[in-house]
Amino acid sequence: MTNMIKQTSARKSYGSLGAVMMALALTGCAGGFNGAEQAMYTADVTHPITVERETTSLNIDVARGQIAMSPSDRAQIEAFAQRYRAKGHGMLTIATPSGAPNSGAAASIVSDIRTTLIEAGIPKEAINYTPYQAPSAQVNAPVLVSYAQYVAKAQPCGDWSDSYSHMPSNTAPANFGCATQSNLAAMVADPADLLGQRPMDTADADRRSTVLEKYRKGEMTATKREDQDSGAVSKVDK
């Protein structure tokens, strides 16, 4: 009887020792990954995207005595306006040369540029005018059109210094997430969005009044659906 009690106690001791050793082994595998510092090593921390403010400008050369823009200049202004609407921030500035032989011609071109910008959808309140000092010998001093935009830049990838076959600390390798961050920096429509959320647009008072008036009359307030809004891929079966 005494022998059986000793054997039972030994089994319990071995079982407890095995459980402790297994727990220690699992803890060793988890290693530094469970630390607060390692938990913060996400891709946006290890491979941050920097957003910088840059100035984009367009030079419109003006000849002495010129009174209007050429068709090619007008096309450049229209394309420039579209880029400003997509990524521009702040005012769109038109700078005219001062002290150059073509200063008078440049002043007359500004009116043409302003009209082209407004026709391209740029509010007149968003256009700023300023002079700049041009060399007196510069016969064809340009009119400068510029705006500020943000540019996203990612860190270079390709750090394969870590061994993927032996990583007892369970931490992410040095190159982990770098490609994703690089793709995000290249594809983001407006890098300014990486700096924070955009403010909400103001409410449409006219639309709100229309909806409330229909509600008071008991009419449908939803937008009228057309046949093309059905979502059907094909109408062959009809």
Image: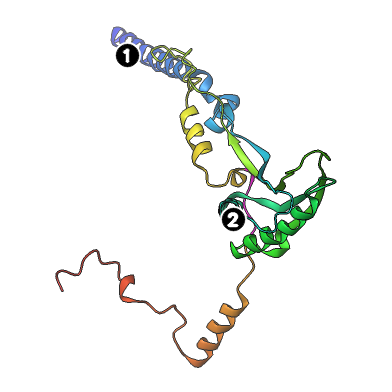
Tell me if residue 178 comes above or below residue 134 in the rendering.
above
Q: Identify the image quadrant of residue 53.
A: top right
Mark number for residue 122? none
Name the residue: 67% across, 39% down: 54
Mark number for residue 8? 1
Crowd tier of the residue under label 1, counting other residues whose Cα lies within 10 Å: few below 14, some 14–19, many 20 or above: few
Mark 2 residue type: Arg
According to the image, label 2 marks what residue?
Answer: 74
Residue reaching furthest front?
Answer: 65
Tell me if residue 3 comes above or below residue 101 in the rendering.
above
**Magenta: main secondary structure:** loop
User: On the picture, is 159 further left or further right than 48?
Assistant: left
Is 198 a magenta residue?
yes
User: On the picture, is 4 further left or further right than 41?
Assistant: left
Name the residue: 41% across, 11% down: 166
Is 158 a magenta residue?
no
Q: Residue 233, percent across and down?
A: 24, 63
- Write the start and end of the magenta stretch as one range: 195-200
Crowd tier of the residue under label 2, counting other residues whose Cα lies within 10 Å: few below 14, some 14–19, many 20 or above: some
Q: Residue 138, percent across and down?
A: 77, 39
- Viewer-side residue, 114 vs 49: 114
> Mark 2 falls on what kind of element?
helix
Name the residue: 50% across, 92% down: 217
Mark 1 residue type: Thr
